[in-house]
Amino acid sequence: MPQENLPDPSGSPQPVHPVGELLQLLSYAAAALLGVGIISAAFVTPVMGATRSAQLRWEDRQHQMERAAGAFQNQRIGGTNATRKSSRSVW
């Protein structure tokens, strides 16, 4: 490389501050993690309507099971057993 193409440094040499660069790198990493956390939380959080709908379906299913259990108990108390169709064994 010819000498005339090299830049001429003006002033005194400046020290390199690796601590400043490290802090800058850490701040970028923290900002990136915060951004990823906010975005992932937005995708994981259920919508209120979906939560309410699921709760209503669960309550409806619970009521169906309670009605079925009550009907079964009423049939047992009345002396009939609707689950057995025949007294004969299949085998």
Image (cartoon, rainbow, N blue to C red):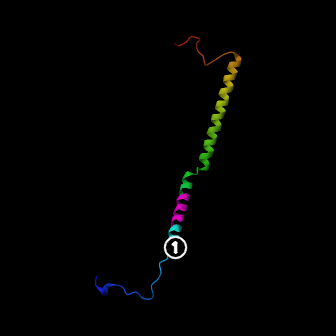
- Give the residue drawn at x 37%, y 87%: 8
Residue position for label 1: 19
Q: Residue at x 30, y 86 (%)?
A: 3
Residue 56 lies in what quarter of the image?
top right
Which type of secondary structure does the marked residue at label 1 adopt? Answer: helix
- Measured as percent of width and height from the top left, residue 45 is found at 58, 51
Residue at (42% x, 88% y) in the render:
10
Amino acid type at circle 1 is Val
Magenta region, residue range: 28-38
- Taking the view exactly as shown, the residue that stands out farthest to the right is 77
Q: Is residue 74 left or right of residue 26?
A: right
Asked if the stretch drawn in magenta spans residue 33, the answer is yes
Q: Say above or below: 41 vs 25.
A: above
Relative to 72, say whether 91 is above or below.
above
Quadrant placement of the N terminus: bottom left
Magenta-colored stretch includes residue 67: no
Q: Nearer the viewer, residue 52 or 83?
A: 83
Residue 82: horizontal and vertical position, in percent? 62, 18
In front of the other: 81 or 20: 20
- What residue do we see at 69% from left, 15% from top? 79
Relative to 63, residue 76 above or below:
above
Quadrant of the image occupied by residue 64 = top right
* Structural crowding at the residue carrying mark 1, measured as other residues with C-alpha within 10 Å and reported as few (<14), some (14–19) or many (≥20): few
